[in-house]
Structure formats: C-alpha cells, structure tokens
Amino acid sequence: MARTLLVCVVIVSALWFLDRESVLFSQQQPSKGVAKIGVVDLYAVSQKWKKWIDLADEVQKEVKAGQEKIDVEAQKVRDMEMKFARAGLAENSEAWLEEKTKVESARLRVAWLKETEEGRLENLATEYGKKLLAEIEEVIKKYGKENDFSLILKVDEIALEGRSWAQMQSYVKFKQVVYYEEGINVTPAIIKLLPEK
C-alpha cells in the first residue's frame, strides 16, 4: 500500500514537473500546447467607458426627476395635512372622516408612487447595465480570440479603504484572482477597443 502511494506521488510529481512549463503567464505568442492567460479589471473598464459613464449620468438624472415628482406629491400631502389640522372639524364627524380619508389616500398614493418609481429606475438601470456588460464581455472574447488567449480572468482592483464590513465581505466572497504579474493585465487594451457610442 505504501509502495503504491509512493509510486503515485512520484508519477504526479513527474507530470507536474513536465507540465509546469505549459502555462504561459505573459502576452508572448504561445506555442502549441501552451496556455496564454490574461486578466481584466471589469470595474476599471466600466468606469473608463463613456457609454457606462453616460448610463450612470442618465440614471442619476432619472432618479432626480423621479424624486422631484415624489417631492411635489409629498408637498401636496403636507399641505392637505395642514389644511385638515386647521379646519377645526369635530373629530369623528362625517366631514372630519371624509377629509382624513382624503389625506390617508394621498399618503398612500405618494408611497405607491415612490415604490413604483424606485422599481422602474432599478429595472431600467439593470436592463441597460446587462446590455453594457454583455458588450464589454464580447469585446473581451473577441480580443482573447484574436490574440490567442486561452483564458482571461476577471480581477477587481478596488480600494478597500472606506468600505464597510459588509462591502469587504462581499469583495472577499467574489474575489477571483489574488495575484498576477502586471504583464498579463489586458485592461488597457480592452478599454481602447470599446466603442464610443
């Protein structure tokens, strides 16, 4: 049993030694049987791509416009509440109940508007974000094929300073590459290849 284990260890070691030269960690032209590996920082790509920046600006404009619409309606509710409070109606009278119902309905309408607007904006941003990410991925795939890469991995080079514990936990959970030589970073090349519009 020990002899079989020793033979297996020797065989695995020999295979590892013979195969360790078959992975090329650079952008050199690979020879047959050699894997060419690159990395790309998708966050950096997105932050430097005009289409992505324009999307973020557009979403911010939509958020502001939506918030302004909500603020107008919320002010109407506050005005109704003040008018109701100053009306001097006898509590639980028919007129008092009617006005209170109007105020409550207006409050519910504002809450519904806020929820609807937030959902609409989230869906809009998600839909466009998915399309832009798909465009970025297509550029990466095309670059990888045209430049004979076997594999291009995603890296995240975001600063952890100022991040909350929850954000750091998420970062650690999704971190894929801890170390790489700068020579295999294809991020600048991908940024140059992204279409302007």
Image (cartoon, rainbow, N blue to C red):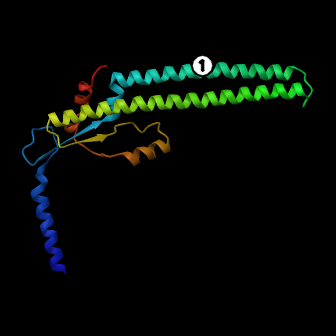
Position of residue 67 in the picture relative to residue 82 (left or right): left
Find residue 143 and report its horizontal and vertical position in percent.
20, 33
Query: 91 and 22: which one is in front?
Result: 91
Q: Residue furthest left?
A: 31
**Residue for point 27% across, 36% down:** 40
Query: 169 and 33: which one is in front?
Result: 33
**Residue for point 62% across, 27% down:** 113
Q: Residue furthest bottom?
A: 1
Pointer 1: residues within 10 angstroms few (<14), some, or many (20+)? Answer: few
**Residue for point 44% across, 32% down:** 126
Find residue 95 and report its horizontal and vertical position in percent.
88, 24
Identify the image quadrant of residue 47: top left
Q: Is residue 171 above or below residue 94?
A: below
Query: 72 and 44: which one is in front?
Result: 72
The kind of residue on which mark 1 rests is: Glu
Residue marked by disc 1: 68
Quarter of the image with the N terminus in it = bottom left
